[in-house]
Image (spheres, rainbow, N blue to C red):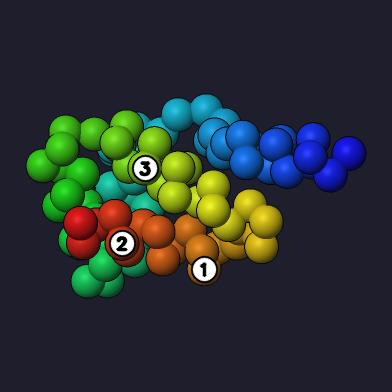
Amino acid sequence: MKELARYLLQNAYIDFQGGIALEDVRKFLREEDSRESRLLLSKLIDEGGVEDLMVTVADCLKEYITTGVNEDTIFEQLRIYSES
């Protein structure tokens, strides 16, 4: 059982239900108007969409499955992504 649990944990992945358009992201980020939100929006515009963001953040959050994913964890991953 422990080996199976370890295997399942190591092979779990995070996926976001539904899609989100760049325009929807713009609306969320405009309301905040912080340095981080402007940086992220600029990066997404340069990349031409949110697809890379969604894949990267989901992949990075995988390491937090064992300790928990919360709003602060996701915020930190978005910040790191926007600065990369």
Residue 75 as seen in the image, left or right of residue 10? left
C-alpha separation, residue under disc 1 versus residue under disc 2:
12 Å
Residue 18 as seen in the image, left or right of residue 39? right
What residue occupies the far left of the structure in this picture? 46
As drawn, 72 above or below 78: below
Q: Secondary structure at mark 1?
A: helix
Q: Are marks 2 and 3 in contact (CB under 8 Å)?
A: no
Q: Are marks 1 and 2 in contact (CB under 8 Å)?
A: no
C-alpha separation, residue under disc 2 versus residue under disc 3:
10 Å
Q: Amino acid at mark 2?
A: Ile
Q: Which residue is mark 2?
A: 80
Q: Residues within 10 Å of mark 2 (few under 14, many from 20)?
A: few
Q: Residues within 10 Å of mark 1 (few under 14, many from 20)?
A: few
Q: Which residue is mark 1?
A: 72
Q: Amino acid at mark 3?
A: Thr
Residue 79 on image: x %, y %: 32, 63
As drawn, 61 above or below 70: above
Residue 23 on image: x %, y %: 29, 38
Residue 44 on image: x %, y %: 21, 44
Q: Which residue is mark 3?
A: 56
Q: Secondary structure at mark 2?
A: helix
Quadrant of the image occupied by residue 11:
top right
Labels 1, 2: front one: 2
Q: Give the mark nearer the N terminus: 1 vs 2.
A: 1
Q: Residue at x 44, y 50 (%)?
A: 60
What residue occupies the far bottom of the structure in this picture? 35
Q: Quadrant of the C terminus?
A: bottom left
Q: Give the mark nearer the N terminus: 3 vs 1.
A: 3
Q: Is residue 30 visible?
A: no
Quadrant of the image occupied by residue 82:
bottom left
User: In terms of depth relative to the viewer, which is nearer, 34 or 11?
Assistant: 11
